[in-house]
Image: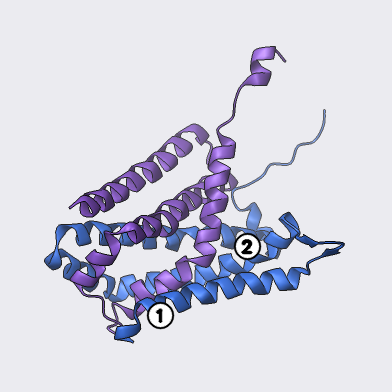
Chain colours: A blue, B purple
Amino acid sequence: MSYRSELTRTWWLKHHAFKAYMLREATVLPLFFLLLSLAMGIYSLWQGQNQWQAWQLIMGHPVVLVVNSIALMASLYHAWTFFQLFPRVMPIRLGEKTLSPKVLIAAQWAGVASVIGLFAWLFRGAL
Amino acid sequence: MTQKAKLKRSGEPIWWALFSAGGVCFAVFIPATIVFLALLMPLGVVELSYSQASTWFFSFWGLLFTGAVVVLPLFHAVHRIRHGLHDLKVQHHGLVKALGYGFASVLSIVCLTFWLLGFLN
């Protein structure tokens, strides 16, 4: 009879690499909260001006602000792990040379920065 | 293995495609969305009036916004929650899958319906 080790629910606490993996899995929890609040925003916008203002007040509630700040950090952590994976999954070749992973990672962060730039441009009147 | 079992199709490629597309959106579009809509706007640093918001959202841009910022990240989140629960040894795989993707689908349809109603209005 062969020996089979029992995996417990806390297996991932035993090594820092497993903890990092579970932390990355957990980045979607504050994201989930953010998505629910955005869905609520879409509904409020459809309802009209009063609901829209009520939604803005809810978004300004300290607890909501804290959870969404955690969501921001989680999204950046996710981006950091995700951007490192991309050059490994999809190495890009230009002729004989393979594009350096550093270039691809930098290009992806430039993408994040340009979306922030796009939002800033959309809000330009109010900044 | 019988011929029938070999040919059984898996839904996994669909969930994986939604997961990876959502992962890109989570990394690229979500940080900016949080900074502006969930932090700067509620703190009063930037303003977004009802007329500005509804004009912009109930146009073609709103459809792109809903897809890239709500629907795809939602399927990404559900996929990770599903696998996270598996890692925590939650055994009810079929139930978790049905509830997760069911919820993501319903919420996506609701958001897209409100966009469509506003767009047609």
- State the residue at coordinates (34%, 72%): B37
Mark 1 and mark 2 on one chain: yes
Q: Nearer the viewer, residue A13 or A88?
A: A88
Residue under label 2, please give it. A82
Question: Residue A14 lies in what quarter of the image?
Answer: bottom right
Earlier in the chain: of badge 1 and badge 2, it is 2
Q: Is residue B79 above or below residue A85?
A: above
Q: Secondary structure at mark 1?
A: helix
Instruction: Find residue A83 and name its label.
Output: none
Q: Secondary structure at mark 2?
A: helix
Residue B9 percent across, percent down from the top left: 59, 25
- State the residue at coordinates (47%, 66%): B29
Residue B93 percent across, percent down from the top left: 52, 35
Instruction: Find residue A120 and name its label.
Output: 1
Q: Amino acid at mark 1?
A: Ala
Q: Can you tell which of label 1 and label 2 is closer to the viewer?
A: 1
Residue B19 as seen in the image, left or right of residue B56: right
Q: Is residue A21 visible?
A: yes
Q: Is residue A49 above or below residue A60?
A: above
